Amino acid sequence: MERTLPWKPEDPTYSSLDGPPSFKPAKKYSDLSGLPASYTDPHTKIRYANTDEFSRIRMLPSDIVTGYLALRRANTPVP
């Protein structure tokens, strides 16, 4: 089967190519809704997109906040 392939094993493939790092900053999304987030709560460090999400964040218990941060891999201790 390998003999019939039109390319050689040492030819570059999509998975073997390395690209340079991006110069654009990473996009930030709301931890609650997944919408693009423009804001971060300074107390909990959770990202949010609008005032409704902010009010919901302030009502969350600390274990839920820690869970959201763990999903994002943000190891920030919450008091």
Image: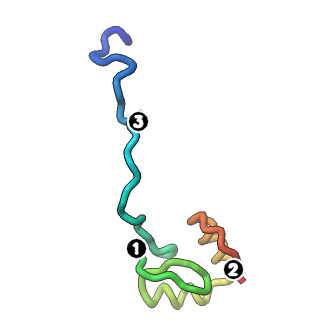
Marks 1 and 2, how far apart at CA: 23 Å
What residue is drawn where x is 44% and y is 90%? 51
Q: Which quadrant of the structure image shows residue 78?
A: bottom right
Q: Amino acid at mark 1?
A: Leu
What residue is drawn where x is 31% and y is 15%? 5
- Residue 24 at what x, y percent from top left? 36, 63
Q: Secondary structure at mark 1?
A: loop
Q: Which quadrant of the structure image shows residue 50?
A: bottom left
What residue is drawn where x is 34% and y is 23%? 11
Query: Mark 1 or 2 closer to N-term?
Result: 1
Determine whether, in the image, residue 48 is placed left or right of residue 12: right
Residue under label 1: 35
Q: Amino acid at mark 3?
A: Ser
**Mark linked to residue 15:** 3
Query: Mark 2 or 3 closer to N-term?
Result: 3
Marks 2 and 3 in Cβ contact (< 8 Å): no
Q: How is the image coloured?
A: rainbow
Q: Nearer the viewer, mark 1 or mark 2?
A: 2
Q: Amino acid at mark 2?
A: Val
Q: Residues within 10 Å of mark 3 (few under 14, many from 20)?
A: few
**Mark linked to residue 78:** 2
Q: Is residue 62 above or below residue 1?
A: below
Q: Secondary structure at mark 3?
A: helix
**Mark linked to residue 51:** none
